[in-house]
Each structure stands twice: as structure tokens, then as C-alpha cells.
Image: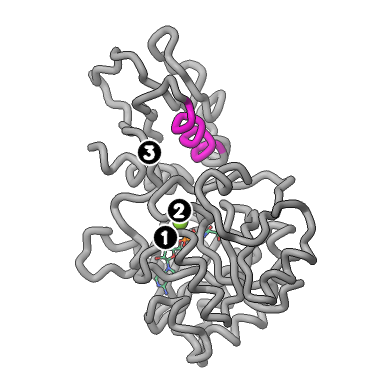
Amino acid sequence: MKGNNIPRAAEFIRNGGLVAFPTETVYGLGADAFNPQAVARIFEVKQRPSFDPLIVHIADFEQVYTLFSPPVSDWVEKLANAFWPGPLTIVHRKSPDVPDIVTSGLNTVAVRMPSHPIARRLIAMAGTPVAAPSANRFGQLSPTQPRHVLKQLTGFDYLLLNGYEMVGIESTVVSVEGNGCRLLRPGAITLQQLEAVVPCIQQKAESHDANLPSPGLLKSHYSPEKPLYILEEGMDISAPGAGFILHRHSMDSPADAKVFYTSQDYNFTEIAANLFIALHTMEEDGSVSRIYIEPVEETGLGVAIMDRVRKAAFRYR
Ligand code: TXA
Ligand code: MG
């Protein structure tokens, strides 16, 4: 079932159902965070391994105290004041009330307060924090449109349609420990924005680290079902079936090739918003058998864009 009926969707959440809903980053697949059976269904529907913990979404700052264990670090309030509601996820020691299935047994929980009006109304009307990963099948492309969700998932109860623009890239994940903060996943909030609020923030550990600080940080993720290559100087791109994802109209591609421009003129906000749309479009295009994507400079939002591009391309290096 799909539509714009937020009260209906909230009722599904309250009754242990699953709702796919838009956030300002990507679509989420949500369930009542305090209902372990409902959360278990998220893992089934997504075919997500149980070692990968979920983000819990809240509508009101007070809900933090039902999820984080006291004493709640001062950094939480600092970060929340600066970036909530918005695309920042904060990882902090969890309250014993948070079901283990939400956190994959970790003693920390990831929480964020989205700014998207539909997400906020849904969570507020549900009257409970909503555990929600991105609404894609595990390892596949993230969804930024309702049809992306329908392409990958079945077995949920309600799909809320969108009418708002999206950032197009997942939230930035920061963990707050003792007296410091660490960037676990680059995302919609840039490192520069974070440094202005928490100057001591540490960069994320490499994802091949044996002790993953964030279990979902795998090297391969967000992948299309066709080979994806990052464009490099001198690459042979002449064979038929090549599709190109480019970020400026001035960039050339072979005549007659399929091309998706994410931006006219290399605007990072536009590139982020269109990145997964471009990848889904190429994945769906029957005339495209290989996808080539132009890299971007790794500054500002470009760091998160290239993080997603590298993970999407990893299998085909
Ligand atoms: O923008 C977003 O964050 C979207 C929307 C729906 O909110 N959600 C999203 O969820 O991207 P997901 O499940 O695709 O990614 C959650 C990330 C994973 O990398 C996971 O490992 C990490 O957050 N994470 C969750 N709980 C954690 C914890 N306790 N400690 C460390 N990392 C955690
Ligand atoms: Mg995801």
C-alpha cells in the first residue's frame, strides 16, 4: 500500500508494521524501535545481516533520554544544537531499554532527528522512536525515490510518497565517546561543518580495520547490478553498451553513448541529489551493460560523494 496518509502509516508503526518513508537524505524502512519483533522484520525484508545495526529516528530531543544511557555526553547537545533536525547521526552508549536487535548487540546506539517534514510527522504521530535503515536491499543502491524502494523491497506495509527535495546521500555518522568525537561515515554534513562545532573530531578509521568501529562500513556497498567503473585518464571506453554518469555538460563522452548528467556545472549539491537517481537509471537501462562515472574532487560534500562512488564501484576494480 502506498500514499500520503501519515496517520495511517503511523498506525502501522504503532502496531508493529513496517513503513517506507522519505527523509531528507534517502528513503528509510522504519519500525517501532522498542518492538524487537517489528525490527526483526526490517532485517528480513532488507536481507540485512544481523551484524549491521540500525539508526533510530526521533522527532523530539527529549527522546534522546529514552535511548542514550546517562550521563549523556555534552557533545550530544552541542551536535544536536548545531545539526538537528538534520542529516547527522550520533552514536552514544545505549540505554538498556533499547532492544539488542536494533544495535546488533553493541553497547551503543545510533540516533538522528530528521528534518524532512513527512519523516518528522510520521515519528511524532507514531509516538515512539523509529528504527530505520535505508530502504534498499542490503548492499544495493540507496533509494531516493518511491520507485527505487518498490524496485528492491517487498513485504512492508506502507510506502509514504514524497513531495520534497532530498540531499540524496545518507547522514554523516559521528560517535561520541568519553571526551571526544569520531567521524564514522562521511555524509550530508561535511567534516568542515563538524569541525566548526566539535574541533577535536577525529577522522574515521579505515574500513579495512579489523575492529570495525561501525559494522556497516563495508568496502563494497550501494552497488548497481552492473559493472561500475570510475573514469580515469586513458581508460578504454569505446566498447558498445557503455553508459556515462557525468557532472558537467562540458565533459565529453563517446557519440551515441547513454549519458546522465547529475549537474550542468559540477555543483556538489546537485551531484549528491542525483547520484543514486543516475545509478538507478543506468541500472535499469537495457542498452547499458557497463557504467562509467566521473570522479569528483574530495572536498566538502565531495568526500561523501566519492565514498559512495568507491563503494559502489568496489566489486569491479
Ligand atoms: O541518512 C541516513 O542515515 C539514512 C536515513 C534513512 O536516515 N539511514 C541509513 O541507515 O543510512 P543505514 O542502516 O543504511 O546505515 C546506518 C549506518 C551503518 O553504517 C551502521 O553500521 C551505522 O550506521 N551504525 C548504526 N548503529 C551504529 C552503532 N551503534 N555504532 C556504530 N555504527 C552504527
Ligand atoms: Mg544503507
Tell me the number on the disc at residue 225: 3
Residue 281 lies left or right of residue 120; in this view the side is left
Looking at the rendered image, the quarter that the N terminus falls into is bottom right
Marks 3/2: CA–CA distance: 12 Å
Q: Is residue 284 magenta?
A: yes
Q: Amino acid at mark 1?
A: Gln
Colour logic: one colour
* Among the two numbered marks 1 and 3 on one chain, the one whose residue lies closer to the N terminus: 1
Q: Amino acid at mark 2?
A: Arg
Q: Residue at x 38, y 52 (%)?
A: 139
Q: Amino acid at mark 3?
A: Glu
Q: Are marks 1 and 2 in contact (CB under 8 Å)?
A: yes
Q: Nearer the viewer, residue 229 or 80?
A: 229
Q: Quadrant of residue 148?
A: top right
Residue matched to label 2: 137
Chief SS of the magenta region: helix
Up-down relation of residue 225 to residue 45 (above or below): above
Report the number of numbered marks. Answer: 3
Position in image of residue 121 (x %, y %): 75, 65
Label 3 sits on a secondary structure element that is loop
Disc 1 C-beta below 8 A from ligand 2: no
Q: Nearer the viewer, residue 264 or 108?
A: 108
Q: Residue at x 77, y 53 (%)?
A: 4
Let me know if residue 310 appears in the view: yes
Position in image of residue 84 (x %, y %): 63, 66
* Among the two numbered marks 1 and 2 on one chain, the one whose residue lies closer to the N terminus: 1
Label 2 sits on a secondary structure element that is loop
